[in-house]
Every structure is written in structure tokens, then in C-alpha cells.
Image (cartoon, coloured by chain):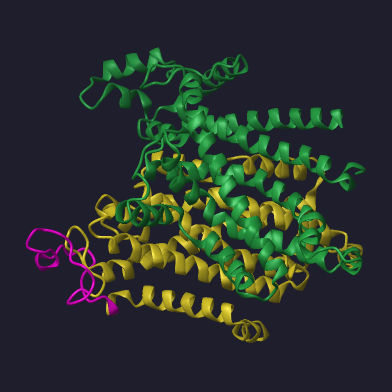
Chain colours: A yellow, B green
Amino acid sequence: MHVLKSLVRQPTALFGLVVVLAVIVLAVAAPWIAPFDPDNQMFEGLSLEGAPLPPGGQFLLGTDTLGRDLFSRLLYGARTSLVIGLVANGIAVGIGLLVGTVAGYVRGFFGNLLMRFTDLMMAFPALLLAIVLAALLRPSLWIVAMVIALVNWVQVARIVYTETRGLVERDFIMAERSLGAGHGRVLFLHILPHLMPTAIVWGTLGIATTVLLEATLSFLGIGVQPPQPSWGNIIFESQSYFQAAPWLVFFPGAIILLTALSFNLVGDALRDILDPTQRGRG
Amino acid sequence: MAFLILRRIVQMALILLGVAAITFLLLYALPADPARMIAGRSATAQTVANIRRELGLDQPFLVQFWTYLANLLQGNLGRSYAQKTEVATLIVARLPATLTLMLAGIVVEVVLGMILGTIAAVRRGGAVDRLVMMASFVGVSAPQFVVALLLLYVFAATLGWFPMSGYGSFAHIVLPATTLGVLGAGWYARMVRSAMIDVLNQDYVRTARAKGLSSRRIIFRHALPNAVLPVIAMIGIDIGQFMGGVVVVEAVYGWPGIGQLAWQAIQQVDIPIIMGVTLTSALAIVLGNLIADVIAPVIDPRIRTR
């Protein structure tokens, strides 16, 4: 409650929160809001010359090159983007938490090995790796989510590792140990709860990164495959046509930007609220 | 110092070895079959098997990896499956275009970031300051390919100031470099701003002001140099980001660099090229970090003692 109150008090965070909630509601309610079937290639959706229709009139945001309603496709695309955002980022934060806490708690040879592996992953060009993996696997929604999770957990692991190492040295962990608590108890009941703020912050900030990465992969044609709409592949399908029908590129583009921006704003505000020591840092 | 650099170089070699191993394993495990790709759709099973044997793809994984490593240590990246040329030759031919683009991107990013950040720090709470804070968020939230298409639409297709795509002249590089650099500029501005604000509140700046130095001299001589260090560290990190970004930017602008080479290779399952580009990118990332670490103590004597 206190967190929510502090969030609402900052204008930028409030803006982000409102947009995030709006995107979620629109995605969930897509079947009821969408004026047309997103896959329906309508005859009246194209001009007499066979060109897509500009925004306005019967089709709120215009139609695409196949005569499908852009607004409906964007609504259903929100579902794709959010599902990938939540799943991929959830997995990434999960792996990051696991690797980070284990490496920070166990230390010794095994912990070192884990962190060296994390360092190694940091030297990977993330986007290139994602592109290679997504292109060579047969792309589908779940494959894309897995690929994104695989390249995104590294940063979380690094931060969690540093925090865990700090926590392990604290007196209350020592006290707990000397009372006879086992490793499982210390890890799950005492260390993990302290990492929750970090997990929440990265759970939010990471969704922005994930939405962008999904859009980029789909834009290259190796993400979510048409006809299933995603914000990225709507642009992919119409990019060769973008001079004649710029709305097909810039409406989805603006929505990707707005969504990622809002998740970033909310995540940043959460970081300020949950972790006052980080306040004001880049 | 020399010992430290030596240690870092050994670490770098190990990291590159690790990157090679993981990429090789991933490419081996993926279901895409390069032999089938080369043979074409109508090839018989016999042809595919022949090609596979020719390329050594019928060998066990460890044998293949060992052969690759042994060649790599001799500086041999292997031959492209599709183009039948040495991968090293292909990469070297493409490298100048990509490096030019990355350098231009970094220039855009740093210059824009330094100017905006300085103004924001000096005029705290002003219009530029608020713009910088907002731009830093918009910059990390904007999809690069949409920015690329937007710039193309406005400055090439509509206004006609720059060519749509291609390579060769200064006009060709403006839009791709802006695409690469403009999004990061907000974060640079933010970093410069916070580094300068820290300094502007310190006693020695007050002393400088009290003894009558002009504010221009205070800003450029006393405050701005403090912002250089984080900027250099950031450039080291950015090189890694750019190596991925160039694939998208080069695809949109038809820029004949490494990203385009990688993109073609990925579609043809040309594994030697994919390996070569990944290793080149990883090398750029570790080199970027190393150079940032080596330059830092040269610029800031306080770090030397550590």
C-alpha cells in the first residue's frame, strides 16, 4: 500500500502505471474490444487499387497490406507482447535469482565457477546471440520467450550475487546459523525475502527490455510468426510498404515505445521506493 | 601495471575460448542442417551425405570442436560454406564499414550527450534538464528499428536530404550513425549531468568562483573533466551493445558491414561465418572493456594507486 501511494505521488511513475494498466486491460479484453477479427483479410479493407486504407473512417487506425484492421491486430499483438514479456522475463529473473544466490551463498570453487560463467555470458553480444538462436530454431512464441530469457538473466544474476554476498556477512544470518538453521532455511526464509525488492524492480524493468527484444526479433522475421500478430511482426510485414503506408510502421512503433517507456518509468520509480540507497543513481 | 594488463589479456583469451565453445555447442545442437542447406531442396540423401563428409560434419562433436580450435589458434577461421571463401577474408573486408559506422555512432552519442548533459547540469531544473531526464528514458525504451525507419521516412523519403541506403559518402553515414547514437545520448547526458552536479557543489568550485574565474572556465576546466571517466567506461560497454545493434541498423540501411554478413550467414546456416562474427563481436566487447580500464588510470591519477 505504501509502495502504491509513493508511486502515485510521482507524475512520471503515475503516467507509466496508467499506461501499463491500460495495455494489460486492452490485451485481456481484446476479443471484446476489437471491432474486427485480426486475421480477417477484408475486401473492403483495401482501396480499389488494392492499397491499404489510411486511418480514419470505418477502420480506426487504417488497414494493412492484406486488408486486415490494424487496430484489432494491435490489440491482439498486445497479448503476444505481454505474454512474452511476462514469461521470458519471469524465467530470466528466476534464473538470475537462482544463479546469483547460489553463487553468492556457496562461494568456493562452485560459486566461482558460476560467476565466471556469468562473466562469460556478459561478453556475448546479446542481440546477436538472440538473433542466431531465434533464426536457427523454428521460431514460435515459446521459442522466442526462451531465447530472450536465455540472454537476459545475466544482469540479474550479477546484481543478486553482489547483494547475496553482502547479506551473508550480516549479523542476523550469523545468528541464524549459530542457532542451528540449515542452509535451506537460511536461503529461503532469510536471504530470499531480502532479495524481493531487487526481483520486483528487475521484474518490471526487464519487461521493457523483453518487449523491445521481441519486437526486434519479430521485425527481422525471426520472432513470432504471422498471421499471429505481434507488434514487431506487424512492422515486419509492412516495412517494404512504409513509404506509402507509414501508419503501418509508426502506430505499432509508437505503441512499442510507449509500453517499454512505461515499464521503465514504473521500474525506476519502484527502485527509488524499495531501495533508497540506489536513489538518484543512473 | 604491465602485470595487470598481462593478466587481463590471459583472462580475455579464456573468455574468447569460452565464447567459442558455447557458440560451437549451440550451433551443433540446433536442428538447422548446413549440409541440406548447401545441397538445396531437390538434392538426394547421397549428395547431402557427401557434402556432410566433405565438411567434416559427420565427425563426433569433440573431434569437430578440436579441429575448429586447432585452426582458430593458427588464426584460421575456416571457410564459408556458401561463399567458399576464407571467413577471415570476408570479415576483414566488411570490418571497415562496420567500424566506421560504430565510430560515427559513438561520436553522435558522446557529443550529443556531453552538450546536453553540461547544459542540464549548469541550468538545473531548466527545460534542457527536464528534457535530458525524459530523453534518457525514451532512449532506452525506443525500438531501434522504428527509429531507423522514422529517420528514413522523414529525412530520406520525404525531405530527400539523405540517400535511402548505401555506402560510400558522408551523406550515407548520417542516418545510420544517428540511429545508433541518438538513443544512447540520453544516458550519456544523464551521466555527465550527475557527475558535474557532484562537482559543482564542491568547495573547490566555490573557491574558483570566489577568486573570480569565469563560469565558462569553471565548467570546462574544473567540472567537465570529471565527467570524462564515466563516459569512457560507458563507451567500453556500448561497443558490446553496438555489435548487436549493427545487425538491425545495417539491415535497414543496406550498410555493407559485418552485421549484414552475419544476417546473410544466419539465413544460409553458414556456420563458419556465424562463428567468426560472434567471436569478432566478443573480441570487440572484451577489447572495449580492456581499453576503458587501461585508459582510466591515465586520465584519473586517483585510480593508479589502487
Magenta-colored segment: predominant secondary structure:
loop
Q: Name the quadrant containing residue B168.
A: top left
Q: Position of residue A35 (x, y in %)?
A: 22, 76
Left or right? Give the position of A26 relative to A95. Answer: left
Please tell me which residue lies in front, B180 or B46.
B180
Q: Residue A244, position in %: x, y?
A: 22, 57
**Residue A58 magenta-drawn?**
yes
A11 vs A263: above or below: below
A204 over B157 or under it: above or below: below
Farthest residue in the left direction?
A48
Picture coordinates of residue A102, whole percent (x, y): 73, 52
* Quadrant in which the C terminus of chain B is drawn: top right
Q: Nearer the viewer, residue A33 or B233?
A: B233
Task: Give the residue at x 60% y 74%.
Answer: B127
Quarter of the image where the N terminus of chain B is located: top right
In the rendered structure, which segment of residues is drawn in magenta? Answer: A33-59
Left or right: B183 in relation to B267? right
Does B197 sit left or right of B51 as displayed? right
Residue at 64 percent across and 75 percent down: it is B126
User: Is residue A140 something that shows in the picture?
Assistant: no
For the point 62% across and 32% down, the residue is B283
* Residue in the picture at 42% in, 74% down: A23
